[in-house]
Each structure stands twice: as C-alpha cells, then as structure tokens.
Amino acid sequence: MIPLRIKVEANTDQPFVVRLRSFEADAWEQRTEQLNPFDAALEHVGPEGADYVGEAGPIRILGIDPSEVDGDVLLVNPRRGTADRLVRSSSQDNTLLVTERCDQVCLMCSQPPKKHHLDLFSYFETAALLAPEGATIGISGGEPTLFKVQLFDFLRRVLDARPDLSFHVLTNGQHFDLDDRDAMSRIDLARVVWGIPLYSRDPAVHDEIVGKAGAHEQLLENLALMCRLGAQVELRTVLMRPNSDGLPQLARFIASTLPFIRTWAIMQMENIGFGRMNWKALFHDSSQGFDVVGRSIDYVRSRGIATWMYNFPLCTVPEPYRHLAPATISDWKRAYREECGGCSLKARCGGFFEWHPANHGYSNLGAIQ
Ligand code: SF4
C-alpha cells in the first residue's frame, strides 16, 4: 500500500506545509522553473535519510525514496516526527480530510466519526495552491459542511487563485440552507462536484442506514436547493442488503424527481470501519444479484442521466455493463487478489480495497481470459 504518512525530522516545533523537490539544489540552476517559498530542494541522500532545505528550514525524510515524493506537498508535524502527504504529485487520488466529526452514523461508514476536530483549513489552502496543474482535489470527512463557512471560503479562495483546479466534495447534504446562497454564489460551482449519498426512495430505509431521523426529508429539500444554486451533484448509493431490493424504485425516483443531477453512482461497500463490523448483515453479492443493479442502471440511463458503478471488480459485472464500472478505488488503497493473476481486464479494473477480506463475499469472481 502507498504510505500517506511518512517519518520526518525537522528543527521546529510548529506544523508547516512544504513541497519537496527531489532535485539537488545545484540542478535547479539548470531548470527554468523557479523554487516557490514553500519548496524544499533535495540537498543530500544518505543511509540516515534524505535531507531537503528550503525557506522553512531543513527537513529530513526517512524510509522512502526521494524520487517517490518529488513534488509532494506535506503537512509536517515535527513534534510527532511525521508528515502527511496531502498532495501526491503523481496521483489523481488526493483527498483532504477536513474533519472527523459527523452528524450521521451510517451503518457502513468507512471512517467512523470522532468528536474531536482540529481546524486545518489554512494548511489545506496552502497545500491546494501548491497542487500540480489541472488537479482535482477531493474533500471528505466526517462531514465537511459542519464547517461550511470555512469550507466555502477555502473553495472560493483556492478556485479564484488557481483557475486550473477543481474539487470533489463528499457531503451528506444535510447542512445547506438558503442563507448559503451568497457564499455559494462566490464559488465557481462549475469546478466543484458535490458527492451526496441517497440510499433509498423509502425515507425509513434511508434514515435507518444513516442513523438519523428526518435525514431523508432534509436531504431531498437540500438537493432541490442545490439545483437552484447551480451546484453539480453526483448522487451516490452504496449497495447493501437493506436497500438493494428498492434500487429500481430509487432509480425511477431519481429519473422522475432528480433529473438535474450530473451523475448517479451505485457503489460497492468498503470492508473497514463500521462497514467491517456490519459486513455480514450488509454486503450484497452483486456477482449473483446483479439484476437489480442492471435494471436500475438501464432505467436511469434511458432518461439521459449518466450512471456508473464504483468499486465493482470487473469480473463481478456482466460484460455489457463493464464499461460503466471505472477503476474508482484510490491508488493508495487498491489491491488485487490471487484470482487476478493473468486476467485480461486487470489494467482497467479497480480491483479491491486493500482490506477486502480473503473470503471476499463475491461468489462469482475470477480472471477473465
Ligand atoms: S480477476 Fe481481478 S483484475 Fe480481473 S476483473 Fe476480477 S477483480 Fe479485476
């Protein structure tokens, strides 16, 4: 698995953001590119680690080859001796986790909420401004809109300063209201997609899944509001036993009532956090029970709404639908199984989450020749 946190040594107490440039300082004289004040250039590599130097002072990284972190933007925590790779320059899968607080307790949550919150928006803003040209940056939590004032400011400032960047924000959609109209209107909404979960047409089923009474009603209100504000919505439905039978009914509801959404994503579960605790009760084996998925996709697509399957191993999907199942599992947590050896689809298959159980739950899976 690609490490998102690395060991560092730095001569300061306070956290700081730095971008590593793994070219020795002399080599910069040959390059046309200018060093940014947040850049640290490689000075020396030895058995004890790789030493970089920049305006923030010297920093040593340990346990990773400098070539693997060239251009990476780190949030360094000197007291802990660690740095989080907020932006990996070689990856399309950079996500900023802005809070671990949430007002829902979803049955399959992969990142169970915590009470503690640390506001890191100023560091995230610096990091985003140092991201590679054209990057799309994910925002997740917890629930990011619990801190929507800071979030909206962050999006506005970064998008204003970097016309090449865009964002994908995961939110439960519970906290938007009419008072957000001004703040939202100052954000370039053409470059923000809001990924919002809707699990069922049946309010009782949705509320049960998210662990919050009235969540369904609030969500439908807010989806209508987001439509009026001109937000781009990617509706997300994690496929589980409690909602799988109702998927075709949800599909009809989406096509008739929410035709303004940009995409609908039907998603397979992730076996971590609450998803692991509740796996046996929730996991829907779509390699057997694909019928509800196929019918739902056909219906929504026939109404002109783009519909995708996220996190589905390609061999579990009937051939006519495979082009609708992109490789969506992030590079740092993607893994393949023994069964994948020699599979002709591997290059375009997203495989499995690293932590997917060995007895994987799919009754029908294996290399496609
Ligand atoms: S065998 Fe592995 S690589 Fe091939 S389609 Fe299935 S999960 Fe993907």
Image (spheres, grey):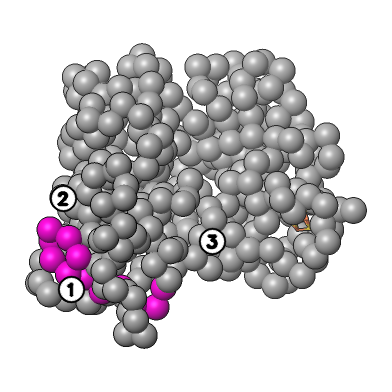
Q: Of 124 and 87, which appears nearest the observer?
A: 87
Task: Identify the mark nearer the N-term, 2 or 1.
Answer: 1
**Residue 129 seen by the camera:** yes
Pointer 2: what residue? 37
Amino acid type, callout 2: Pro
Report the disc number at residue 220.
none
**For ligand 1, which image quadrant applies?**
bottom right
Q: Of 262 and 47, which appears nearest the observer?
A: 47
Q: Are marks 2 and 1 in contact (CB under 8 Å)?
A: no
Q: In which image quadrant can residue 76 be found?
A: bottom left
176 left or right of 330 in image: left
Task: Identify the mark nearer the N-term, 1 or 3.
Answer: 1
Pointer 1: what residue? 10
Give the residue furthest to the bottom.
47
- Residue 150: percent from left, percent from top: 18, 40
Q: Residues within 10 Å of mark 2 (few under 14, many from 20)?
A: few
* Label 3 to label 2: alpha-carbon separation: 32 Å
Ligand 1: does it lie within 8 Å of the C-beta at label 3? no
Q: Of 258 and 336, which appears nearest the observer?
A: 336
Q: Residues within 10 Å of mark 1 (few under 14, many from 20)?
A: many
In the structure shown, which secondary structural element does the residue marked by tag 1 occupy? strand
Q: Which residues are magenta?
A: 53-64
Amino acid type, callout 3: Lys
Mark 1 vs mark 3: in front:
1
Pointer 3: what residue? 333
174 left or right of 302 in image: left
